[in-house]
Structure formats: structure tokens, C-alpha cells
Image (cartoon, rainbow, N blue to C red):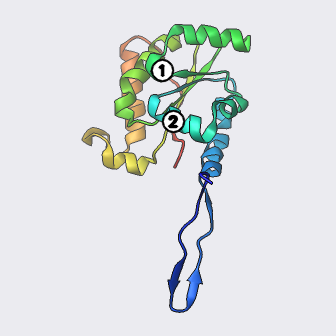
Amino acid sequence: SLARLVAPRFEGGGSSVMAAPFDLIGESQRSLFESAGELMGALVYIDEPFSQLARDAWGIKQLLGTGAVNVCRLETAAAEDLLRSQVLSAEPIAKVVVFTGRLLHDSYADIVGLLAWCAPNGVRSCAIFTTMAEETYSALSPPQMSLYPFESFREKLLSQLRGMGVGGSGGGEGSGAQ
């Protein structure tokens, strides 16, 4: 089964060691359910790299089953997404959640663009999840963001939004799949 990875059997010294099976799909879905509180009532944006994980491991149906109102593509985010989602939920959308499979600095322009039109339209909270742990990102991030990359990204994002005259007290970042 594609959902189960099993380590090979090692023969040595007359004993046989077998590793426990690893349920890749189950582990991916566990991270989704751990994020469920953030997803309740949210408009969710996923980028192209993350959409493969959402399709193969989570499934959009399960993503919506956690309480997300709608799932849209980050690279093509538009105000119409918010309007359609408000019709679907029959309530104003107050938060967005972004899942990215790219490095945060590579997603920066898309996220700033999204938040620039979301904030004036009633969105008050944003959570950003990445597909890598902060330690991994630290090794791959630009030098000015390498010490505390998620906090540095948050501060850079809030500063940019304030500079654009958009509020910006919003949520934080998380590491979705660790």
C-alpha cells in the first residue's frame, strides 16, 4: 500500500529486527486535525506545492470537513474568493489560513497581496502553516531571517502591511507538517 512505509528487515548476528510500520497518510492527516481549530470558519489558501499534499494525503473533502469554509489557490487569490466564501458560510469571513509548501520568503509576495485586500474586507486573523520545521527553514532562509525565521517573517509581513496602511495585528505562523 502506498500509505504505509515499512523499513526493510535487517539480518545480523542471528537476530532479525523489524521496524514498526510508518503510516505516512495517517501522520499527514494527524497534522491536519491538529490544525483544525485554526481552520474552523476560515477561508483557506494553499499554494501549488502544498496542493499536492492536500490532494494526495489530506483530501480537500477532509480539509473542508475540519470546518474550513472554502479552499482557494494562493497564487491566484482574489477578493472574489472572499465574497464566494461568505455566500457559502452565510457569515462574514474573519480569518484566513495559508498553507505553503514553499519557503516563506518565496511565498511572501503572494501572502502580502492576499492580506492587503483581506484586512480592509473584515478579515482579522491569519495563520500561516509551512511544510517544514523552523529548524530546517532556518538552514535554507536568507541570512537576515536565519536566527528566528518564522518570527522574522511575521515581523516583516506586519511591517509591510502597516506601511501599506493596512492593520496588522493578526495571527502567527505554524509548522504544519513537521
Give the class, few, some or many, for how many residues have Cα within 10 Å of label 1's Cα (few <14, many ≥20): some
Quick one: quadrant of the N terminus? bottom right
* Foreground of the two, 122 or 28: 28
SS assignment at label 1: loop
For marks 2 and 1 on the same chain, the one whose residue lies earlier in the sequence = 2
Q: Which residue is drawn at 53% across and 71% down?
A: 8
- Horizontal side of residue 70 vs 77, given as left or right: right
Badge 2 density bin: few <14, some 14–19, many ≥20, Cα 10 Å: some
Q: Is residue 166 above or below residue 95?
A: above
Report x, y in % for residue 172: 51, 33
Residue assigned mark 2: 52
The amino acid marked with disc number 1 is Gly
Which residue in the structure is indicated by mark 1? 168
- Amino acid type, label 2: Gln
Q: Which of marks 2 and 1 is in front?
A: 2
User: Which of 78 and 14 lies nearest the eye of the viewer?
Assistant: 14
Q: In which quarter of the image is residue 64?
A: top right
Residue 20 versus residue 40: which sits nearer the camera? 20
15 sits to left or right of 159: right
Residue 142 in view, yes or no: yes
- Circle 2 — which element? helix
Q: Distance between the residues labelled 2 and 1?
A: 30 Å
Q: How many labels does the image show?
A: 2
Q: Residue at x 63, y 35 (%)?
A: 59
Q: Residue 30 carries which label?
A: none
**In the displayed structure image, the side of residue 25 where residue 98 appears, left or right:** left
Q: Are marks 2 and 1 in contact (CB under 8 Å)?
A: no
Query: Could you tell me residue 101's position as x and y percent?
Result: 45, 37
Q: Where is residue 22 in the image (x, y as percent from the top left)?
A: 60, 60
